[in-house]
Image (cartoon, rainbow, N blue to C red):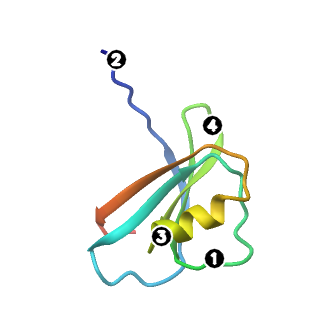
Amino acid sequence: KSEGQVLYYEVTGSHTVRSITKTKGRYWTVISAANTTFTKIPKGLLRIVYIKDANANNAHITLWEREGDAREYFREFTTVNQYFHTPVLINNL
């Protein structure tokens, strides 16, 4: 057994890159501690949510059309990324 862990983040901003019209799909979400500046919009990126973790470290949550696009983009960064299949969106940002 292991103890449960609750992570929380403070949202400091967001940017919708491409319009999201469907709330059901095979989207992918990535939580990344990388201090990435998105100067070029990578293939498949839909949304960026800028966050701070419990220790006030900058990070971001990105939403992607496909898992492969997300993994390809983050391959060049030496950081810990968490990937999540996201079948349903609550599209209120």
Q: Is residue 36 left or right of residue 8?
A: right
- Dividing the picture into quarters, in which one does residue 39 lie? bottom right
What residue does disc 3 label? 64
The amino acid type found where label 3 is placed reads Trp
For marks 3 and 4, give the one nearer the viewer: 3
Quadrant including the N terminus: top left
Q: For the residue labelled by badge 2, is the local secondary structure a helix, a strand or a loop? A: loop
The amino acid type found where label 2 is placed reads Glu
What residue does disc 4 label? 56
Crowdedness of circle 4 by 10 Å Cα count: few (<14), some, many (20+)? few
The amino acid type found where label 4 is placed reads Ala
Answer yes or no: is residue 13 visible.
yes
The amino acid type found where label 1 is placed reads Pro
The vertical placement of 32 against 25, above or below, is above
What residue does disc 2 label? 3
Residue 4 horizontal/vertical position (percent): 33, 23
Answer with mark 1 or mark 3, whichever residue precedes in sequence.
Answer: 1
